[in-house]
Image (cartoon, coloured by chain):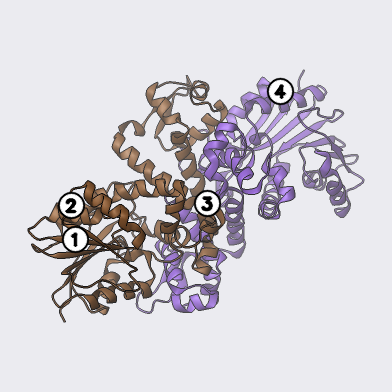
Chain colours: A brown, B purple
Amino acid sequence: MVGPARFMTLLSCFELGIVDAIQKKPGQTAAQLGEAVGVKPDAVEQLLFLLVKERMVACDERTGGYTLDALADVPERDLRRALTYMNMIKVVALRQLFYLTESARTGTLVGLKELYGAEGTLYGAVAEHRDLRESWATLMDTVTARIDPWFFENVDIPAGSRVLDLAGNTGLGAIHTYQMKESPGLKVTTFDLPEKEEEALANFRAHGVADHCSFIGGDVFEGIPSGFDVVLIKHFLDMFDRDDVFRIVKGVHRTLEVGGQLHVMVPVYPEDIHDTDNYNVDFFPAFFIGATMGQGGPQKLSVYRRWLEECGFTVTQAISKDPAEIPNDVIPIPALLSATKER
Amino acid sequence: MVGPARFMTLLSCFELGIVDAIQKKPGQTAAQLGEAVGVKPDAVEQLLFLLVKERMVACDERTGGYTLDALADVPERDLRRALTYMNMIKVVALRQLFYLTESARTGTLVGLKELYGAEGTLYGAVAEHRDLRESWATLMDTVTARIDPWFFENVDIPAGSRVLDLAGNTGLGAIHTYQMKESPGLKVTTFDLPEKEEEALANFRAHGVADHCSFIGGDVFEGIPSGFDVVLIKHFLDMFDRDDVFRIVKGVHRTLEVGGQLHVMVPVYPEDIHDTDNYNVDFFPAFFIGATMGQGGPQKLSVYRRWLEECGFTVTQAISKDPAEIPNDVIPIPALLSATKER
C-alpha cells in the first residue's frame, strides 16, 4: 500500500540533490540542507525520515545533522545503475500504471494514450517522446552491455555462420555478435522494422563492422527472412502473449534449414513462484501490460522450453543466470534457451 | 523499486473482478476467469502471479485452477476497508507522486495542477473533482467513524462546556462530540471555511442536533473565534509545516481563557524512527508534500508535546493508540494530546 510513496520518496531525495549534499558535507541539518538544495527544511526532514528508517542515512539526534549510513558503502557505479532503473520506472511506468486495469481490459496502453496521446506500444512512443526515450534507452543500453557477454559466452556460433538477430533494433546485438564471436566468414544481419535501418547502418560503420553486418527491414509477424544458420531472439519473446510467441517461433522454425540453431534470451520467472527473493512477478506483468506493450510478460524457464518444443524445436540448453551474480537492484533474471531444428 | 507495480497489480486484480470471480466459483482456470471478467487469459495469468506468490490466491499446478488462499480468511469488512485505502491512494496519490520532486521544491502540488488543472490543495480540489472527492471522502468517513470513539473515550469535556471543533469540516466532529459527550447545556461549534456552512447545518439537522451545534465560518490563520472552554483540533496539524502549526496553536492559546482546554488528535511517527513495523514515514511525507498539501507531515508524539508547550500550553496527556488495536491495512497511528492554558 505504501509502495508508490516509498518509491518516490527515495527517488526524490536523490533528484532534489539531498543525498549528494549530505555526501559532500556530512553533518548538515535539515535547515542547512534545505538551503543547499533550495527546498524548505520541513520537507527535507520529512523526506529523509524514510532514509533514516531504512538506515541509508543516519541522523544525529543531538545535533540534527545527517550523514550517509548504508549509502556510504554503495559504490558509485551501483548507485547510478539503481537510479537509472528507478528513473526508468518513474518515467515509463509510475503514472501509466494508474490505468493498469483499463489496459488489461483492452489490451492497449491506456496510460500512454492518456498521458502522451500515443497509440501503439512504448517502443513506438519512444521515437517521439524524448523523456520516455532517454529514460528507457539509458537503461536498455546498461542492461545489454551487462548481459550480452553472458549470452555470448554460453552460445555456440560455428565459424563462418550466417546469423540473424531477430528484432535486433539498431544493430547493437549484431555488433556484439561479431565482436564476441568473430570467425572467418561470419556474417550477422539485424532484422527489424525498416525505420531502424539508417541508424543500424551508421552504428555498423561507427564500430568498424560494416563489412560483416547488414540490415534487413521487415515485420516479424509478416515474414522472417531465410538463408541463415543461426537465429538469435534476445529480449523479445517476453513482450508477447502465448499466441504471438508461437507465431514468432514457428516462423523461425519454418525459415531455418534442418540443423539450424535458435538461441533465445528472455527474462524468466522462478520455477517456484513463491520464491520471495525474486521480484520478477512483482514487476513484469504490470510493466508489460500497463506500461510497454498492453500484453506479454515472462514465463518460467520450463514453460519456454515446452513452448519451443511445441513449435518443433529440440531444446539443447536451458539455463538461467545465477541470481547471485546479479546485483540486487537489477530486476530481470535472464535465461538462455538453445534449440535445433532437427527435422 | 517494484512498489508501484506491486500496488497496481494487486489493486487491478480486484478492480477487474478477478478475485470476486475466483471467490464465486473456485477452481476456474485463467481461460475461464478471462471469459468471466472480459480480460485476455494471458493477462489474467500474469496479474495473478503476484497474488500466488504472496499466497493470497492458490493455483493448482495440475489443473491450472485458482482458489482463494489467504484472501479466503479476510473478513469482507476488512477487505473493503483495505480496498478503500488502496483506491484513495491510487486516485489521490499514484500519478501525482510522479511530480513529488517538483512539489517539494516549490511547496505546491505540481501533480494536482498538471493532472487536474487545480491550484491550491487537495482539500480545495475535492470540491470540483468527483473522482478525487469520492475516493477521499469515502476513506475519511471510514477513518473518522473508527477513530472518533477512541478520541472521545480519552477526552474529558466538562458538563455544559462550550466546545469549538477547529477545522471541523462539515460538522461530523461536532455531531460526534454531542453524541458521545452529551451533557446539559453542551454547545458545540464547528469552525471552518464559510463554504462548508450550508452542508454542516444540514448535517446538524439530519442528526437532530441543530439545537446544540452551530457553525462559524472563517480562516484559522486569520482569526480563531473566542468564548469557548474547549478546543478540539482533529486531523489537522499534520497538514502543516512547523511555522503554521505554531500559528494555529498560538492562535488557540490567545483565544482561550485561563483554564481552557485543548485536545489535539494527530497521526504520529514512532519515537524510534527505525521501527520497521510502522509504515507512517513510508507514506505520509510523500502523501502530504506530493498529493494533498505541498507541505506538512506528522511528527513524533514527543515533538508535538514540545511544540504545544512552546506555544504556552501545559500538556496533561499525550498518548498513542495501541498499534495492536489498529488493523494491519490502516496506516496512521493516531495520537491524542490534551493541554491546558494555565496562564
x, y percent for residue B224: 81, 29
- What's the chain of the residue with tag 4? B
The residue wearing badge 3 is: A95
Q: Amino acid at mark 3?
A: Arg
Residue at the limit of the structure toward the top, as seen here: B343
Q: Is residue B48 visible?
A: yes
Write down the chain letter for disc 3: A
Q: Amino acid at mark 2?
A: Val
Mark 4 = which residue? B313
Tell me whether the residue at label 3 lies in contact with that at label 1, contact meaning CB atoms closer than 8 angstroms.
no
Identity of the residue drawn at 45% across and 30% down = A17
Question: In 3D space, how far apart are the residues under numbered discs 3 and 1 (Cα atoms)?
Answer: 39 Å
Give the residue drawn at x 86%, y 37%: B216
**Whole-Å distance between the Cαs marked 3 and 2?**
41 Å
**Nearer the camera: disc 1 or disc 4:** 1
Q: Does mark 2 fall on the same chain as mark 4?
A: no
Horizontal and vertical percent position of residue A182: 11, 55
Which residue does the numbered mark 2 point to in the structure image?
A209
- Three-letter code, disc 4: Phe
Q: CA distance from mark 4 to mark 3?
A: 45 Å
What amino acid is labelled 1 in the image?
Val
Horizontal and vertical percent for residue B140? 68, 49
SS class, disc 1: strand
Decide which of tag 1 and tag 2 comes sooner along the chain.
1
